[in-house]
Amino acid sequence: MRPVAASDASYLLELRAAGGQFLNRGASTLDEQRAWLDRYFARNDDYCFIVETANGQRREGLVGLYDIDRDARTAEWGRWVLAPRSNAAVESALLVYRFAFDVLSLASVRCRTLAGNAKVVAFHDSSGLARMPAAVTIEHDGVQRAGVEHRLSQQQWPGVRARLDGLAARFATALRDSGRTRR
């Protein structure tokens, strides 16, 4: 994971175009994407990262940690968009949690997912995050839609870290054994 740069604008536009039904429309031109990045660079409660292979040779997607409340020590993570056929889900989630808890020393992190995005909801459930019982709504392309909120506290982090570390190790072994490598 590395901080997003202005030079990533065209990649972000391509990534979002391939993203699918659960992404807000967002920027549709390179100028709009550059303008979004300019606004992002001016904020101090927001981190966006490019997810890339360990050797930095291939970008795998984008993830963000934002709406950081430094007094309450909370934040939301999202903007999680992976390239088609990317294998970086477990590792990118693990890295954003490490940044949140080990670097920023946050007390908790929340993520909100459209209820219809069953794969991402199931990922958070299987990772050990607590699903909040209260209904949430998420604005998606100007329309309020049903959502699911998960939270991870600093106290729960060690257990989730162990689970995700184990999954990442098993996945890396399976890739290696199948002859596929991560460039």
Image (spheres, rainbow, N blue to C red):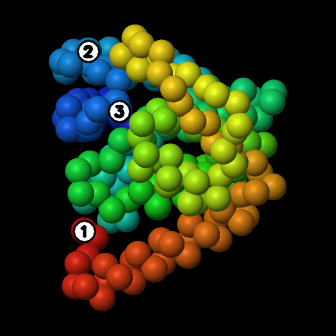
Check disc 1 and report its element: helix, strand or loop.
loop
Residue position for label 2 = 32
Residue position for label 1 = 183
Say what amino acid the circle numbered 3 marks: Phe
Q: Residue furthest bottom?
A: 177
25 lies above or below 130 = above
Judge from the rendering whether residue 4 lies leftward or rightward of residue 9; answer left or right. Answer: right
Residue position for label 3 = 22
Q: Which circle, 1 or 3, is nearer the viewer?
A: 3
145 lies above or below 105 = above
Say what amino acid the circle numbered 1 marks: Arg
Identify which residue is drawn at 31% across, 79% down: 175
Q: Which circle, 3 or 2, is nearer the viewer?
A: 3
- Rendered location of residue 27, percent (x, y): 27, 19
Say what amino acid the circle numbered 2 marks: Glu
Check disc 2 and report its element: helix, strand or loop.
helix
Q: Name which of mark 1 and mark 2 comes first in the sequence.
A: 2
C-alpha gap between disc 1 and disc 3 = 28 Å
Depth check: give the residue in front, 128 or 10: 128
- Quarter of the C terminus within the rendering: bottom left
Identify which residue is drawn at 56% across, 22% down: 137
